[in-house]
């Protein structure tokens, strides 16, 4: 009986949290609901993000952290449909993913997809083939990040100013380390 009450109290405490930390791994955020596929990292919720729907109510979260997790998932559109479903209008989604030119991205066998500066355009409506989902997000920020070096300071500025040219011509010579996106959920 005592254990049941403790479990119920813990679930109620979690339901008050409005930040969702997807694929938390060892980066536990105390003020968030931390979700991971493995219980070995001691998340608040153990769940495979490929299994839909996620175990959260509609329009609950005001912020989602998706750091180094989206590249491990099979279905980009389904993932963003679920993020849209569980978020409130104007919720902020913070994302890091490896850039397609990052050498480390190819050595991790758990990576299912690679990302471009323009990948999020499918869910922001900035791509001509935006019709795969009705879930919409507003792009607040998109940046390519590079490892720290003198030349990369210059490359960082040019790559973020001219992302299309960078990805077509220079990405394999001066590879970006990862991409950072901030999106805002848009609900009608």
Image (cartoon, grey):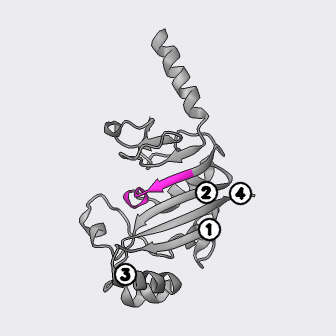
Label 2 crowd bin: few (<14), some (14–19), many (20+), radius 10 Å: many
Q: Which residue is rendered at x = 40% and y = 43% of the image?
A: 36
The residue furthest right is 188
User: What segment is highlighted magenta in the picture?
Assistant: 64-72
Q: Which residue carries the number 3 mark?
A: 152
Marks 3 and 1, how far apart in space? 24 Å
- Disc 2 to disc 3: CB gap under 8 Å: no
Circle 4 or circle 1, nearest the eye: 1
| Vertical comparison of 21 with 114: above or below | above
The residue nearer to you, when weighing 145 against 40, is 145
Q: Answer left or right for 135 relative to 102.
A: right
Circle 3 or circle 1, nearest the eye: 3
Question: Residue 30 in the image: x percent, y percent?
Answer: 49, 39
Q: Earlier in the sequence, mark 3 or mark 1?
A: 1
Is residue 110 something that shows in the picture? yes
Q: Which residue is rendered at x = 41% and y = 88% of the image?
A: 168
SS label for mark 3: helix
Label 4 crowd bin: few (<14), some (14–19), many (20+), radius 10 Å: some
SS label for mark 4: loop
Circle 2 or circle 4, nearest the eye: 2
- Disc 3 to disc 1: CB gap under 8 Å: no
Q: Which residue carries the number 1 mark?
A: 140
The residue furthest top is 1
Marks 4 and 1, how far apart in space? 16 Å
Question: Residue 172 in the image: x percent, y percent?
Answer: 32, 84
- Disc 2 to disc 1: CB gap under 8 Å: yes
Q: Which residue carries the number 4 mark?
A: 187
Q: Is residue 167 magenta?
A: no
Mark seen at residue 92? 2
């Amino acid at each position: 009986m005592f254990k049941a009450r403790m479990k119920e109290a813990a679930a109620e405490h979690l339901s008050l949290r409005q930040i969702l930390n997807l694929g938390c791994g060892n980066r536990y955020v105390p003020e968030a609901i931390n979700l991971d596929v493995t219980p070995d990292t001691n998340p608040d919720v153990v769940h495979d993000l490929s299994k839909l729907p996620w175990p959260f109510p509609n329009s609950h979260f005001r912020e989602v952290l998706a750091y180094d997790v989206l590249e491990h998932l099979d279905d980009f559109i389904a993932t963003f449909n679920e993020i849209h479903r569980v978020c409130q209008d104007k919720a902020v989604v913070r994302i890091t993913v490896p850039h397609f030119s990052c050498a480390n991205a190819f050595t991790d066998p758990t990576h299912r997809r690679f990302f471009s500066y323009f990948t999020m355009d499918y869910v922001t409506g900035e791509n001509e083939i935006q019709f795969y989902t009705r879930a919409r997000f507003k792009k607040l920020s998109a940046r390519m990040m590079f490892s720290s070096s003198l030349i990369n300071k210059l490359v960082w500025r040019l790559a973020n100013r001219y992302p299309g040219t960078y990805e077509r011509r220079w990405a394999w010579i001066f590879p970006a380390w990862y991409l950072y996106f901030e999106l805002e959920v848009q609900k009608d």
